[in-house]
Image: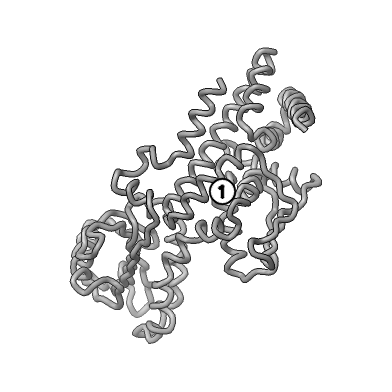
Amino acid sequence: MFTSQTSSFQDSIDVEERDDFDSEEIAGYSQKIQLNCYYTIYLYQGTSLTLIDSSLPTEAEPELRTYISRRLSKGALLGGMGNIAMVELSIPEQAVGCYCCLLEQERSPEQPDADGNGYVICFMGGSEKGLNLYPLQLDKYVQGLHSSLQTPELQNLETEVRPYLSRWYEESVMHIHRVVQLVQGNISFLLHAALSHTPVEVINSDEKTKADVSRFIKAASLQGLSQQDTTAASLCKAITEDTHSDLVIDCATSPPTITNPVSNRFCDDWIQAFLNAAERCNPFLLRQILENFKLKAIQDMNSLKRYVRQAEMSHYALFRCCQFLQGCGNGDVLLQNARAEHSDLPEACSIITVLEEFLREQAQAQA
């Protein structure tokens, strides 16, 4: 049983050996890389596209415009919702992931038929699969530009619009990389805090660092992914009522000082994967590793729930529960979530109490 668990866990960490990426992408992940990133913004009126600004080479922009025109003619770009695909352009990469979004203008009484007019914004960099790891972040970033596009004739192009577009990769994609670089081997404490819903406070830092850490915790959290919507709320309430202390990251020192650090073997086992990916400077790989981390945690949670249901009718199943918790290295978090989810089921709570006592005895024996 432990052999299969270890094999499954190792498959989750070894992203380079999985089929999530093609051979060219994997080759790129094996070394430190510097991705080229581009942006383009068009004015869209009726059926015509007018270039406003672009960081693409001169010869590549008309190729992108042709591609966007085809997408618009097919109705493939919906207002406010990005579309991601691979495009071939006259750039060093030849083929690049391209995110496109249509920001529609609000219709005015003077132009009741202006539906569909607006701006088409394109971000290019990495691969299609890479950008597909950040769809919500890119959508949100584009929406942040909406107010700046209300200025007549875009008189704020150089002061607001262009600088904002130029930062898309840094703001929407690189935050996970910055957090791993910040805390280094202490990343396991943040992973554990995210899984256990422990509040995280960042002190003596700028607002950007605080926002990065907050976004990392949100990305690593399983909130919203549970089979029962009430689980996250129940768990947050349980954490509030418990004696858990906030995880504090003090950036007055380098590296930052961590107060109230808590981790477990499961989170510790992911440290090297995050550090290796951060060293290669590829945020797409980091995001994939984070998604694999969450997937493995969800799989283990589902396994524990199955074992708990079986343990209500079988002592052998209870023994298997104990074996599973001992082998997975994430027993404290799994039981915490299980107790919140089964709070209204007395028999399940009794089983969980027995399992919690088992883990405490194991911890005391090892100490």
Residue 112 percent across, percent down from the top left: 33, 73
The correct choice, above or below, for 11 with respect to 219 in the image is: above
Residue that sits furthest to the bottom in the current view: 155
Residue depicted at x 60% and y 37% = 266
Residue 213: % across, % down: 60, 59
- In this view, 360 is above or below 103: above
Report the residue at 22% width, 70% height from top: 61
- Give the residue pinned by disc 1: 220
Asked whether, in this view, residue 145 is left or right of residue 21, the answer is right
Q: Check disc 1 and report its element: helix, strand or loop.
A: helix
- Tell me the kind of residue under disc 1: Ala
- Quadrant of res 301: top right
Observer-nearest of 214 and 346: 214
Q: Give the residue drawn at x 61%, y 70%.
A: 207
Q: Name the residue at 37% across, 72% down.
A: 105
Residue 40 placement (x, y as % from top left)? 31, 71
